[in-house]
Amino acid sequence: MTDLTLSLDRSTRLAQAGTRRDPSTGALSMPIYQTASFGHPALGQSTGFDYSRTSNPTRLALEEALAGLDGGCRGFAFASGLAALDAVIRLFAPGDRVVVTEDLYGGTYRLFERIYRPLGIEAVFVDTSDAQAVAAACADPAVRGLLVESPTNPILRVADLRALTAIARERGLLFIVDNTFLTAWLQRPLEQGADLVLYSATKYLAGHNDVVAGAVVAATPALAERVGFLQNAAGAILGPQDSWLVLRGLKTLALRLDRQQSNAQRLAAWLAGHPRVRRVYYPGLDTHPGHALLAREHSGAGGMVAFEVADPSRVPAILAGVRVFIFAESLGGVESLITYPLRQTHADLPTALCQRVGINDRLLRLSVGIEDPDDLIRDLEAVL
Ligand SMILES: *Cc1c(COP(=O)(O)O)cnc(C)c1O
């Protein structure tokens, strides 16, 4: 990256992600290099590209944009968020324990419990919005890593990333943040001391519900080397077409997220005053326990809102009755989605954990899109 690029605001860099990379034609849009292999100029020489599992120009354009956005040293694009996570967990060895956010993405829970626990890498689930609980769990000498989601899904608990960095540094742990919900536009864990940032790029980074993708950004060259080795050796890479889709999505990340956030703030405030709503979870509301921390450390509360309806028997009618919201899993796209975590996104989590964190039969989760906020409010008003 040039000095000019680094001095520009993130929104400028986002808008021009992947541009000026094809001097031979001047193409504004990064070309899709749909090729498996690259010819060599001569023995012992390379154009910089040999084989597309190792590196591909379209994927590299995306990876460099991701690294720049997070302020990391290198980015890596994977076939999905879980493929990215899988590469990161491979940094650990049998016998290692990893302290992990308890109310985390269901697929992350499944990967740890069903694939890595039998292989000897054990997740220890903790409320990572409680730094003291994290410190206590990390006192176990077998703990080698800390993997945190913040804000969490769907209750939106907020972790103090600086405090967790201090714990991780003291214990020599690898500190990994799943930053899927806020993205580097709103929260930059590497600047707060994390070692690796992880994304489901399927969500806000790509932003249009049209591609499944994942990413990792590494803080240091040593870590980048290890992740790069795993990306090439295990091979769960993102293809050139999908890399291009994520790159195109990135260009409007700032605009989309700002709008999603302002829509979410309006909806959360409106829901909080609604007689048929018992409780609202949104860190942008000053009643939320993570509000002050998020306001101090980060640039926003994002576009996810969860709420409890007063009467759980209304849930099927709400999900069937929405006309603007779409009853669907996933999140982060331009269209507003509504889901029922207990039965959909969090069905893999143990019942006791769901009850403890508040994932109950009244809870609905909104991924707020970029539509007109009054249309969204009228839609919910009609079904509530
Ligand atoms: C969706 C999601 C994942 C998994 O990503 P995929 O792209 O679906 O594989 C991981 N973490 C979080 C927080 C997610 O929302």
Image (spheres, helix red, strand yellow):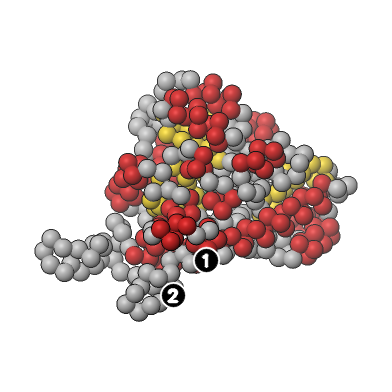
* Image quadrant containing the N terminus: bottom left
Please report the residue visible at 55 percent of the width from the left and 26 percent of the height from the top: 134
Q: Is residue 241 left or right of residue 162?
A: left
Please report the residue visible at 66 percent of the width from the left and 48 percent of the height from the top: 301
* Image quadrant containing the C terminus: bottom right
**Quick one: which residue is furthest to the left in this view?**
43
- Looking at marks 2 and 1 on the same chain, the residue that comes earlier in the sequence is marked by 1
Which residue is nearer to you in this view: 67 or 275? Answer: 67
Q: Is residue 70 left or right of residue 58?
A: right
Residue position for label 2: 28
Q: Amino acid at mark 2?
A: Leu
Q: Is residue 113 visible?
A: no
Residue position for label 1: 15
Q: Residues within 10 Å of mark 1 (few under 14, many from 20)?
A: some
Which residue is nearer to you in this view: 305 or 220? Answer: 220
SS label for mark 2: loop
Q: Is residue 44 above or below residue 284?
A: below
Q: Amino acid at mark 1?
A: Ala
Please report the residue visible at 71 percent of the width from the left and 61 percent of the height from the top: 325
Q: Is residue 135 visible?
A: yes
Residue 347 placement (x, y as % from top left) = 61, 43
Q: Is residue 68 above or below residue 293?
A: below
Which residue is nearer to you in this view: 163 or 227? Answer: 163
Please report the residue visible at 37 percent of the width from the left and 26 percent of the height from the top: 95
Residue 180 placement (x, y as % from top left) = 55, 49
